[in-house]
């Protein structure tokens, strides 16, 4: 069987940023973390967790840490099918506990499809750059990038690694490229 999810980064608009993924039911939460990372374009620099309603909701699934999150269940040991059993269930995936990129996962449907690898079947919007300050910082960055006369425009363009003639495109999403990356997980 396969699980079809819509995953959207919360508090991002104009455009919203989301992906529709189909994953084998036997995937662990750690493997799902990796699929989410590549499908959105994150660089996997930061900690993450899955939980029903965000911080302090249980179960917390991630990488256990005896100092900070002793009650965290190991993401590499729990299969998605142990949690996701009926359509319309939802969960949160939080990436980067400083910027707090909260992704809402909706289980859209469970299919009889036999998959060995995940696939991305749709999406919208460019992933925010790592360490840009969360949803508020990203909104600010988009405003700066839309206004070449903004005093920070040149600095932010350089920070993003854009050449002089290249523009930041918050709507950029390449399904074929994303799917080829997802298939490698």
Image (cartoon, rainbow, N blue to C red):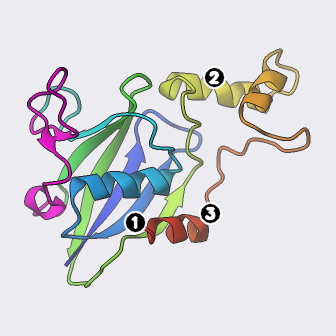
Q: Is residue 128 above or below residue 66?
A: below
- Measure the C-alpha gap from mark 1 to mark 3: 18 Å
Q: Nearer the viewer, residue 21 or 15?
A: 21
Please give the name of the residue rendered at 79% of the width and 30% of the height, measured from the top-left corner.
158
Q: Earlier in the sequence, mark 1 or mark 3?
A: 3
Give the residue pinned by disc 1: 185
Query: In the image, which disc is placed on residue 8?
Result: none
Task: Decide if residue 112 is on the left or right side of residue 48.
Answer: left
Task: Tell me the magenta residue range.
Answer: 58-87
- Determine whether the residue tagged by mark 2 lies in a helix, strand or loop: helix
Indicate left or right for 170 with 120 as reference.
right
In the foreground, 96 or 76 = 76
For residue 140, the mark is: 2
Q: Please, what is the dominant secondary structure of the magenta stretch? A: loop
Residue that appears at 63% across and 22% down: 140
Q: Secondary structure at mark 1?
A: loop
């Amino acid at each position: 069987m396969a699980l079809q999810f819509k995953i959207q980064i919360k508090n991002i608009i104009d455009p919203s940023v989301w992906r529709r993924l189909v994953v084998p039911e036997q995937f662990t939460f750690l493997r799902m973390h990796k699929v989410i990372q590549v499908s959105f374009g994150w660089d996997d620099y930061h900690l993450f967790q899955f939980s029903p309603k965000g911080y302090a909701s249980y179960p917390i699934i991630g990488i256990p840490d005896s100092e900070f999150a002793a009650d965290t269940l190991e993401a590499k040991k729990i299969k998605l099918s142990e949690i996701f059993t009926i359509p319309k269930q939802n969960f949160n995936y939080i990436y980067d506990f400083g910027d707090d990129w909260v992704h809402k996962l909706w289980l859209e449907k469970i299919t009889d499809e036999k998959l060995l690898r995940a696939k991305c079947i749709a999406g919208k919007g460019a992933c925010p750059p790592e360490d840009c300050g969360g949803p508020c910082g990203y909104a600010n960055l988009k405003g700066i990038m839309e206004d070449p006369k903004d005093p920070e425009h040149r600095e932010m363009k350089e920070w993003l690694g854009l050449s002089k003639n290249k523009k930041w495109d918050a709507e950029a999403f390449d399904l074929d490229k994303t799917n080829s990356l997802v298939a490698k997980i």
